[in-house]
Image (tube, rainbow, N blue to C red):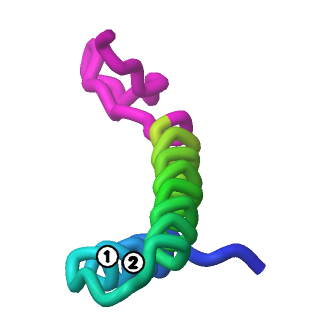
Amino acid sequence: MSKSFEEQMESLEKIVSELEKGDLNLDDSVAKFEEGIKISKECNKILEEAEKKITILVNKDGEMKEENFETEE
């Protein structure tokens, strides 16, 4: 079972805290950094999937209509 976005963010915050302390040796620091990058990518994927599901309710001619959310790039 995969972790929720919130759980992933908590894990990422813990890794950042451990790296900021500076108590880890180089190998452990690199391993933690790699783990943090992996979690960051997973969080980004979760956000992208959520963005695809977002709909906007728009009032057109007195009727409510759902439209897909589109980002401006």
Q: Secondary structure at mark 1?
A: helix
Seen from the viewer's position, the closer of residues 61 and 26 is: 26
Seen from the viewer's position, the closer of residues 52 and 57 is: 52
Q: Secondary structure at mark 2?
A: helix
Q: Which residues are magenta?
A: 52-73
* Residue at image coords 47%, 55%: 40
In the image, is residue 1 part of the stretch drawn in magenta? no
Q: Among all residues in the image, which is located at the extreme front?
A: 26
The residue to which callout 1 is attached is 19
Q: Position of residue 27 (x, y in %)?
A: 54, 73
- The kind of residue tagged 2 is Ile
Q: Which mark is residue 40?
A: none
Instruction: Please determine whether, in this image, residue 54 is positioned above or below residue 36.
Output: above
Q: Among all residues in the image, which is located at the extreme bottom?
A: 23
* Residue at image coords 47%, 80%: 7
Q: Position of residue 53 (x, y in %)?
A: 54, 41
State which quarter of the image contains the N terminus: bottom right
Q: Position of residue 64 (x, y in %)?
A: 35, 30
Disc 2 residue crowd, few under 14, some 14–19, many 20+, Cα 10 Å: some
Instruction: Please determine whether, in this image, residue 22 is positioned above or below residue 32.
Output: below
Q: Are marks 2 and 1 in contact (CB under 8 Å)?
A: yes
- The kind of residue tagged 1 is Leu
Mark 2 to mark 1: distance in Å? 6 Å
The residue to which callout 2 is attached is 15
Instruction: Please determine whether, in this image, residue 38 is positioned above or below residue 32.
Output: above
- Classify residue 19 as left or right of residue 7: left
Disc 1 residue crowd, few under 14, some 14–19, many 20+, Cα 10 Å: some
- Classify residue 42 as left or right of residue 22: right
- Classify residue 57 as left or right of residue 26: left
In the image, is residue 69 part of the stretch drawn in magenta? yes
